[in-house]
Image: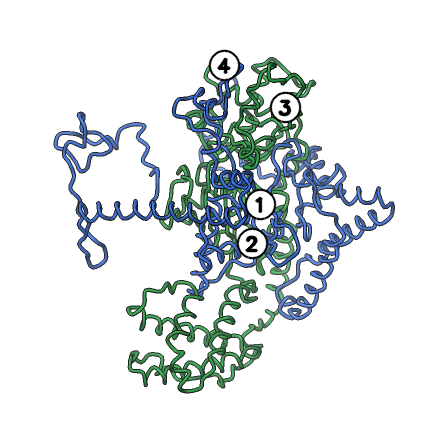
Amino acid sequence: MRSRRFHGLKKIKVRQDWSRWTLYNLSRLREATSTATRGTYFQQKWKAKSITRAYHGEQVREKQWERMFRRNIPAVVPMDHKYLAQKDGSEQAEGRGSGADQERAQKARPATPYMQMTYYPLERRLDMAVWRSLFASSARQARQFVVHGYVKVNGKRMIYPGYQLNPGDMFQVEPERVLFATGASKVGSNRRRREIRKWKAANATGPKPTKVSKAAKAGPVSLQGEYTQADVTKAPDTSPEALRKRLQALMAKTKQVLEAKEGLPTKLKRNLRQFRKEVKRAISLHKSATDLSTETLEGQLELIKKEYEPVAETTGEDLSLVQSVFEFAEERTMRSSAWNEEDGRKPYATPWRPRPYMSAFAFIPRYLEVNQNICAAVYLRHPVARPGFSEVPSPFSVDTNQLAFNWYLKRR
Amino acid sequence: MPPRLRPRISLLPSGPTPTSRPQCLLRPSPSHRHFSQTTPHYEKATRMRRNMYKWINGPGKVFLEPLPGSTNYMSAYDKDGNLLRARKGGDEESTPGSEEAKALEEGKQAEDGSEKPKSSEEELENLDEAAVAKKEEDAKKEQIAKSIPPEGKQDLQPFPLNAQFVSQPVLSEELREAIWKRVMKDGVSLPTVSVEFGVSNERVGAVVRLMQMEKEWVAKGKKLVRPYAEAVMAMLPKTPYVAKGENKRPVNHESINDLIVHPATKQQLFVPVSESRHFTREDAAKAFHHTLLSADDRIPHPELVVSEREAQLGLSNSERVAAASARMLVERQRKAEKEAKRKEWEAKTIMRVPGRRWDFVFQDISVESVGKDGRSEKGVGWRYGIPHEDRKRGQVKIPTKVDG
């Protein structure tokens, strides 16, 4: 499917990836139709087609692309609602008789770059959208993610990279894969690899260094935050007395959690997990009674408050404690430093950092709305051209893209 | 024709030991070519390759790491890898700009220095030191970010040859949160929120959908991909959120009244019209196509035009608001009626039998809906005598839509 040398230096080809080869080739890319290299019209078109196709949907077969090609290119014009309200358009149709002799001050609206949109049908493909959302480091990697089943469309696994996204489709990529694709690689350069090899060789000859694990270093975990499992595993009782007891147990536990905030990270985690279990249990208890949305944490908090308020009033418990615990739980999931820890099992360099040269390629076109926190994006609409701007990211000039467009018109 | 040597060699008896066999018959391993003095081409760095590495380690080095607090696109730099806007600032103020550039370079180098590989034990031991170093590094980055002037249009161009594509700002996380709150907490309708924040209708819907999912992740205790999100958001231009209380103008994210260029209007048309005639946008639309609506009705927010017309008629603000809310109410009622009608129809025609895991849905189907050739899309089931086409050549089996 792919020729042996994907990144060459002789023929300047910009590829859809974040490699240094692409960056270098992008830096020395010149007009395909510069006066020095200009040939016949056919030659120019051929050359333009060749270099643009090396970038746009290189993983798509030529025949396939020819079928996808459309000569009608979508465009929009931004309208001013104030102008529409003021004028009904008749002033543009006025002839000389109505005194339209003097030149109207023409608003200098830049031309719509239709030709930059030559390859817009390709942007509708699922693999391309995954790549444009910065979830993969190359179009081919995005394609692989789709084929390997790491991408969901509207919550369902989609294994066809050629799936044509419809406006409003949401796609998600497995976060681990995204971190792998966009993170710095574990073994970076050849130099690093050599160093590691050398280090390993040196260690193989000498006595093996005793490896001190982090857990051992931290010492034995104290048990002051321990509590019994029994009350958790007990079947929930719906009587008000039992409810109150459960609440008290919950309060005691959360107090422990808050106190243990600094000292014991692992313990803390376990406690929080337990707390979450409790919350879930409490919700399942009352789910049948309410039709409140409890899917978000806020929803859960509201429900808990509503349920426990009368109980708290009778016992004089502090409701703000529950609130603070919820906030803390949210904080932990949102910005926990535990996320970006060192972990040798991960297939990328940890702590995670973006891969080299990523920033030069990082942009998200407007037809996508991306939420990086959950590695999901929505394909809002098809890309469009607007005055002075085209939404299809293309490294080539208008001339080159126009030549390529002309190549794909049926009668060339 | 050149003599074919291989078969003859293969005919040789397997008697001779491998050592006595001439070297050239073995697969020549590149490192064992003792007779050749020249380095083979694949080990030799060609001029092109040398140039590439020269660029990568020279002007291209600025792209290795993101520029703190800013985007880092190719068009923002000159041929030698100097940040153009830092230099521009230097021309105006003579010395500070160059200092900025210098600080920038130093910062970069400092970052590069901190990236030096370490052995794993060292890393384990120096965890605290690393944390301290990171803090210092962050402070330095912040300082650099402050010293660079904000990006212009050219600085946001990822491809130097394509001036028609710039990296447009994305919604900042605060803005996304604010939009979600406005829709889900305050219960404001989508078009209103769209006008309020200057974000297109469909984007508002998408933001709410994605944020809702994010909240669900948090509630489930699923980890958000924070390191990635932070890194990516730092590399992209962002539309900031301006809260109402702040004494600043809200930033429009995008144009919300985009008129789609209808294919019928792409042709040039000559319509003879008498000079005295009042030829409006509606007439023009009719001239292009008899069903084409005028631009006033085809934009996503026609209510803005109506409200603006009322303002021109001299209606007071409160009157306009009342009129707009009345219109909205009517629209809402119309929608509710439509929905009720649909539900009624569903209740009449569709029977649901709840199962253990799935519901069974029964609906009356007409046999005739398969059409004359029995292949109509509307047809249901398999008809006797009509073979499937799914094994035929050229049948595409990729689904065309996925229901959520």
Residue that extends furthest to the right in the rendered view of this protein: B94
Which percent across, then down, holds residue B31?
A: 62, 41
Lower sequence index among marks 1 and 4: 1
Is circle 2 on the same chain as circle 4? yes
Q: Foreground residue, A147 or B125?
A: A147
Residue A44 in sight: yes
Mark 4 surroundings: few (<14), some (14-19) or many (≥20) residues within 10 A = few
Q: Which residue is mark 4?
A: B273
Q: Colour of chain A?
A: green
**Which residue bears the numbered disc 3?**
A32
**Labels 3 & 1 near each other (Cβ < 8 A):** no
Amino acid type, mark 2: Leu
Q: Are marks 3 and 2 in contact (CB under 8 Å)?
A: no
Answer whether labels 1 and 2 touch (C-beta < 8 Å): yes
* Residue at disc 3, secondary structure: loop
Label 4's element?
loop
Q: Which of the two marks, 1 or 4, is nearer to us in this view?
A: 4
Residue that numbered label 1 is attached to: B253
- Mark 3 and mark 1 on one chain: no
Give the side of residue B76 with respect to residue A308, left or right: right
Side (left or right) of A262 relative to B334: right
Instruction: Say yes or no: labels 1 and 2 on the same chain.
Output: yes
Which chain does the numbered disc 2 sit on? B
| Depth check, front residue: A352 or B36 | A352
- Disc 4 is attached to a residue of which chain? B
Chain B colour as displayed: blue
Residue drawn at the location 55% of the way across and 20% of the way down: A93
Callout 3: chain = A
Residue ID for mark 2: B175
Q: Nearer the viewer, mark 3 or mark 4?
A: 4
Above or below residue A51? Residue A281 is below
